[in-house]
Amino acid sequence: MVYQTFCDMTTAGGGWTLVASVHENSVYGKCTVGDRWSSQQGNNANIPDGDGNWSNRNTFGTAESATSDDFKNPGYYDIVAEDMSVWHVPNTFALEHWNLAAILRYHTNNRFLRLYGGTSLSSSSNRRPAITIVYDHGDRESTTKLYGPNPRREFEAGFITFRAINNERAAMAICSGVKPTGCNSETYCIGGGGYFPEYPPHQCGDFPAFDWDRLGQSQGWSASKEMTEAAVLLFYR
Ligand code: G3P
Ligand code: CA
Ligand code: CA
């Protein structure tokens, strides 16, 4: 398999391959075009798995445009990985500036993916692991502040969590940087299926309810503009 990607050969000894980016092109889109990590088919109870891209072998986008649109390459399902690294990079930044522009960078170092056959993201497991992270830029406090005041009361920063379930039993794919301790995970976890039952269709999307209070300025349930307008880049090694 030959494909273009981006590698980080610096962080913690290097060897990190970019396999995906989760980009929110419009938090007001509600499972419309561009919502590849949830659904582009509308908030629909009949399509609970949405576009299915967390677990299928579909690929899309290019590495260069990973901060301007969604990206997924064959490495996502081909690489037998041990650890994950995540960069939150402001939208549209050019590849050569990602490292410096990132608002958060962190990685796991306990080889947790070995427990999940090397690809936890594509696993359909119902387990909900929270993996401790090591920060490369930012810290638990800056992670917490990137989200709204209400979400801050229901998560703990310093983790990557998979498959969070919210109050209405909608599943989100990944809570990157945090471990939920409450159930409004639509305000701090990303990706998931194609049906979000609370106030339909308002929580459906790649960053489900990151701007719930429609302020975009870190009030109520709304994350900061920095967070809502930053792509989440996922690396494997
Ligand atoms: O996800 C946040 C939402 O459940 C908050 O609801 O009624 O406080 O705006 P409400
Ligand atoms: Ca998207
Ligand atoms: Ca809620």
Image (cartoon, rainbow, N blue to C red):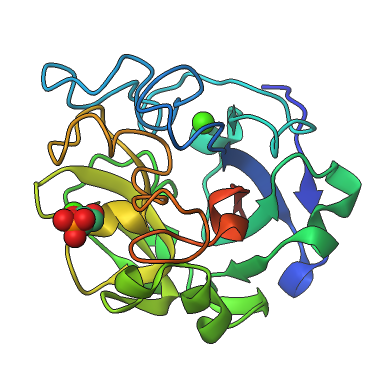
Q: Is residue 195 above or below residue 32?
A: below
Q: Is residue 237 above or below residue 42?
A: below
**Spot occupied by residue 31 in the image (x, y as percentages of width and height):** 36, 25
The structure residue drawn at horizontal position 57% and vertical position 79%, both measured from the top left corner, is: 142
The structure residue drawn at horizontal position 28% and vertical position 64%, both measured from the top left corner, is: 129
The structure residue drawn at horizontal position 58% and vertical position 68%, both measured from the top left corner, is: 107
**Spot occupied by residue 61 in the image (x, y as percentages of width and height):** 65, 23
Q: Quadrant of the N terminus?
A: top right
- 200 lies left or right of 123: left
Q: Foreground: 2 or 91?
A: 91
Quadrant of residue 135 in the image? bottom right
Give the number of callouts: 0
Q: Foreground: 47 or 117?
A: 47
Quadrant of residue 221 in the image? bottom left
Q: Quadrant of the C terminus?
A: bottom right
Q: Foreground: 207 or 174?
A: 207
The structure residue drawn at horizontal position 65% and vertical position 67%, both measured from the top left corner, is: 105
- 137 lies left or right of 168: right
- 22 lies left or right of 156: right
**Spot occupied by residue 207 in the image (x, y as percentages of width and height):** 42, 44
Quadrant of residue 68 in the image? top right
Question: Is residue 133 among what the camera can see?
Answer: no
Q: Residue furthest right?
A: 96
- 26 lies left or right of 157: right
Question: Is residue 43 among what the camera can see?
Answer: yes
Q: Is residue 173 above or below residue 159?
A: above
**Spot occupied by residue 25 in the image (x, y as percentages of width and height):** 56, 32
Q: Foreground: 133 or 222?
A: 222
